[in-house]
Amino acid sequence: METPETSATPATPATPDAWAERANELMTQIEVLLEAQLVEYELLNSKLEEWKQNPGAEWLTMADYEPWQNALKALEVAQREFDAHISTRVE
């Protein structure tokens, strides 16, 4: 006698969804870039805090801001790529 738990046909493995796999890849990329951006932000913030403690010290320059800005730009590009990808989902 068959029950819903013990059907006669074995369960077929789910076919990989290429769209979902790509979405997961993009989300993973965003997570990595977000972490990198956060590290750069914290480094920049520590430089600013150090400067506040020693106002006579050298001013921060664009070279101090550049790593954080580059990390932020990379994150924005990845987010746009993810947004473009998820907008292609057809139900």
Image (cartoon, rainbow, N blue to C red):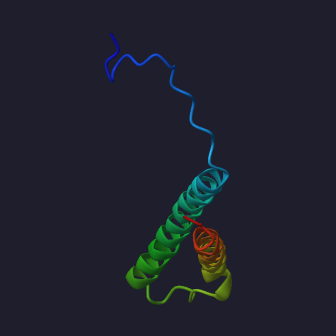
Whole-percent x, y for residue 26 in the image = 62, 60
Q: Nearer the viewer, residue 6 or 14?
A: 6
Q: Is residue 24 above or below residue 87?
A: above
- Give the quarter of the image for residue 15: top right
Q: Compared with residue 62, is residue 41 higher up or lower down, i.e. above or below?
A: above
- When asked about the image quadrant of residue 19, the answer is bottom right
Between 21 and 30, the one nearer to me in the picture: 21
Q: Quadrant of residue 65?
A: bottom right
Q: Residue furthest top?
A: 1
Q: Residue 31 placed where, x, y %? A: 53, 59
- Residue found at x 38% / y 80%: 53
Residues 76 and 25: in front is 25
The quarter of the picture where the N terminus appears is top left
Residue at far front of view: 1
In the picture shown, does residue 59 fall above or below 31?
Answer: below
Q: Residue at x 56, y 89 (%)?
A: 59
| Image-based side of 47 in relation to 68, left or right | left
